[in-house]
Image (cartoon, helix red, strand yellow):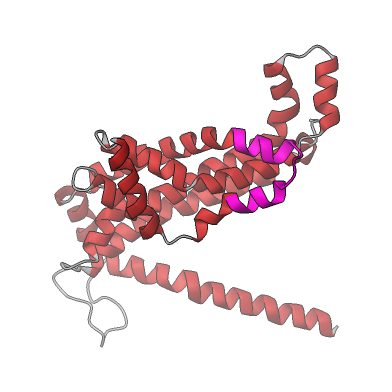
Amino acid sequence: MNRLRLNNILMALVIALAFIWLFIPFVMAVLWSLVDPSQPWTADKLLPPAMSFYRWLNMWQNSSLQPALLTSYTLAPSAAILSLLLAFPTSFALGRIAFPGREVAKTLCLLPLVVPPFITAVFFTALLYRLGLTAWRPGAIIFAHAVVFLPFSIRILTVSFETVRQDHIDAARDLGAGHWARFKAAYLPALRPGIYASLLIVFIQSIEEFAIAFIVGSPDVVTIPVLLYSALGQDYVRPNAAVLSLILVIPNVFLMLFLERLLKSANPTLASGKG
């Protein structure tokens, strides 16, 4: 009984913290995005005195929001696909081949994640300029994002490759399956959740990334995070920043819910190749 009561108390605390940490800032962003410029929202008022969609319409019609949306939602999926392709050989080696120091190699693949993003952006930008890869800036950003977020793809796909059963690979080979047929029968069912997760996580990381998009792409390439940081800069307008924050966050929330549904709907038997 005491343990059940303790579990209930801890669950209530987690829910309360989640509410404070997530729900309240989200509601505040929604309210700020609806503040009508005719009547400012001051500290002595609990709610905005006048609300409208003026800020949304103004941002859509009189800012770089439309090209920024197109750019962001072109760069992010391209970077996710490229990162996935680059991660496949390393993930296969780490997940399927036994060699001395494999666990150390797995850890080393994750070390780039501890480096602050701005430091990575500065040094990566210098490398791109030295290699002459900035002539087409969107391509340079795609390549940079794919490499910077490569540890996510490698880690996720490595775990997926480890779940592939060797007896199913041997059975497919014994039945005369070629390389592609063997991949479809033995590998793909176990890899599919990892592929989905890798694509969506790198997509979200890429679409929210500011430093590389700003340093490499400026002033020709404008993404949503670049617009957001501009709105938070010298000409700080809180309602405009709230609009951009919601445009950046809401699609990612739905994408994460979609990913969660994909992973939950994955038949566990498929991971073992028995689907």
Q: Nearer the viewer, residue 127 or 81?
A: 127
Residue 223 seen in the figure: no
Residue depicted at 70% across the width and 17% down the height: 179
The front one of 160 and 261 is 160
Q: What percent of the width, then of the height, locates residue 249? A: 41, 56
Residue 19, percent across and down? 52, 73
Residue 217 visible somewhere in the drawing:
yes
Q: Residue furthest top?
A: 176
In reply to whether residue 98 is colored magenta, the answer given is: yes
Identified at 34% across, 60% down, the residue is 245
Residue 97 quadrant? top right
**Horizontally, is 158 left or right of 36 in the view?**
right
Residue extending farthest to the bottom is 44
- Quarter of the picture holding the N terminus: bottom right
Q: Which residues are magenta?
A: 89-108
Closer-to-camera residue (36/206): 206
Would you place residue 272 above or below residue 228 in this image?
Answer: above
Quarter of the image holding residue 118?
A: bottom left
Front residue of 165/130: it is 130
Tell whether 3 sits left or right of 147.
Answer: right
Q: Position of residue 87 (x, y in %)?
A: 56, 37
SS majority, magenta = helix
Q: Is residue 1 magenta?
A: no
Q: Residue at x 32, y 37 (%)?
A: 131
Residue 68: x %, y % from top left: 26, 45
Q: Is residue 222 above or below residue 3?
A: above
Q: Which quadrant, please, contains the C terminus?
A: top right
